[in-house]
Image (cartoon, rainbow, N blue to C red):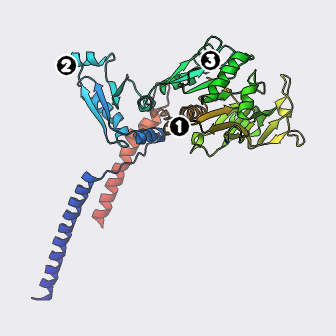
Amino acid sequence: MNKSKKLQLQLLIQHHTFVLFSLVLVALLGFLSTQYHVFRDVTQDNRNTVSEGSINILKQMKGAVSITAFAPDDEVLHQNIKNFIARYQRTKSDIQLSFVNAATDPKLAQQAGIKAKGGELIIEYQKRSEHLIPPYTEQDLTNVLVRLSRTHQQAVILLNGHGERSFSSNNSHDFGAFGKQLVAKGFSLTQPDLLSTPNLPRDSAMIIIASPKVNISAIEVAKIKTYLDGGGNLLWLLDDENLHGLDEIAKYLGLEVTQGLVVDKSAAEFGGDLKTAFGVQYGDHPVTENFRIRTSFPVARRIAARGTYENGWKVQDLVHVAANGWLETTPFTPESDLKKITFDEKKDVPGPINIALAIERKYGKKGQRVVVVGNANFLSNTFVINGGNLDLGLNMVNWLAGDDNLITIQPTILKDGNLNLTAESNYKPVFIGFQILLPLSLLIFGVFTWWKRRKA
């Protein structure tokens, strides 16, 4: 056999070997694609996946979740629902989705209590279920999963009758928005009359004292003290150094509220005034674990507490504010010119300033927990939507309720990704660029490349 034939034979063998190798590689990749799935969301708002908060909830849920969608036989609607649930299934594979047509099976829809048309969902988990009416968002479904994850609905006692912030009012200084979030998370809000109620129920999750404006009677203070003696949990929000009759409770906790107001020089950079302090450092605690969102506290106070051998309290700082500010000890007046306020080394305290505390001690099986914040405005309807204010408030409540596993960051609302071109919009350059110039450029480039290669 001459050299040329040997060379041809070698080339033929190499060719067949390459083809065989390519086929094996394609078959292997095809097999691996059925066994392993790689998914990456490259959209700006991560609209094809769920947020970190939802992922944390899903990872903590033990057991399958069943979702039944009562929807008409509409292919587009079914696909939209599948896409929405798929965002959760990528984290929790045992979420099962099924469809029922209420029109063809009205008896089943009636038994299920279906009221909405076009895709009402029934979510079932551990023999409990809830309905979700369209249009639904990630936050809606995640809230349902959080409620289903709770072993039972927990009661939150709201101290009232002394000018406290209302958890149902939409007034700017009240807590209506925060109250709705607590209900959405599976808490029930009660407002017993402490004067007529013999004792506060010990099986409640906590009592919330939200910035009273008038003094609380000695009888009511005694009942709050009895509740704490029995292991009750407390969320106490302070607006000023005036404890309004709760001095005995402060002494019981070892709480100290420093006279003065926190001012923050960096507030001007975010469009606020000196009396709005921003959270910059968070304590090493379950409430603030992995918490990296900026929080704002209008008119904040410095607080501290000391745990003692006698009371057994363990104290942890939660939020430090005003890294570029200080505690202003000179009282503010309506006539005070904020621009002229300066730091006094002899009187004022340099930042950062701690304004929130987590206090706990061993009591029974689950222990006793208290959170005190030297600010109530951060949860008001005006400010609760700022930064991480809502997340921080919900984390505090979940920790007090003993639901440490439900402490998480709330799902973020997706930004509007639609481009609306109206008659007033200058859309002609966009139309000309994408509909005419871009295709024409590709055509010219293709013809030029073909002509150049042919000439060569």
Three-letter code, disc 2:
Thr
* x and y percentages locating residue 24 in the rendered image: 20, 64
Front label number (3 vs 1) = 1
How many angstroms separate mark 2 from mark 1 (CA)? 52 Å
Q: Residue at x 57, y 33 (%)?
A: 400
Q: Secondary structure at mark 1?
A: loop
Three-letter code, disc 3:
Ser
Residue behind mark 1: 365
Tell which circle, 3 or 1, labels the residue nearer the N-terminal end.
3
The local crowd at label 1, few if under 14, some if 14 to 19, many if 20 or more residues have their Cα within 10 Å, is few
The vertical placement of 259 against 447, above or below, is above
Q: Residue at x 29, y 26 (%)?
A: 69
Residue behind mark 2: 104
How many angstroms separate mark 2 from mark 3 (CA)? 47 Å
How many angstroms separate mark 3 from mark 1 (CA)? 33 Å
The vertical placement of 347 against 240, above or below, is below
Lateral position of residue 439 relative to residue 215, left or right: left
Front label number (2 vs 1) = 1
Residue behind mark 3: 166
Q: Is residue 393 something that shows in the picture?
A: yes
Q: Secondary structure at mark 3?
A: loop
Three-letter code, disc 1:
Lys
Quarter location, residue 7: bottom left
Q: Residue at x 69, y 22 (%)?
A: 211
* x and y percentages locating residue 199 in the rendered image: 60, 18
Tell which circle, 2 or 1, labels the residue nearer the N-terminal end.
2
The local crowd at label 3, few if under 14, some if 14 to 19, many if 20 or more residues have their Cα within 10 Å, is some
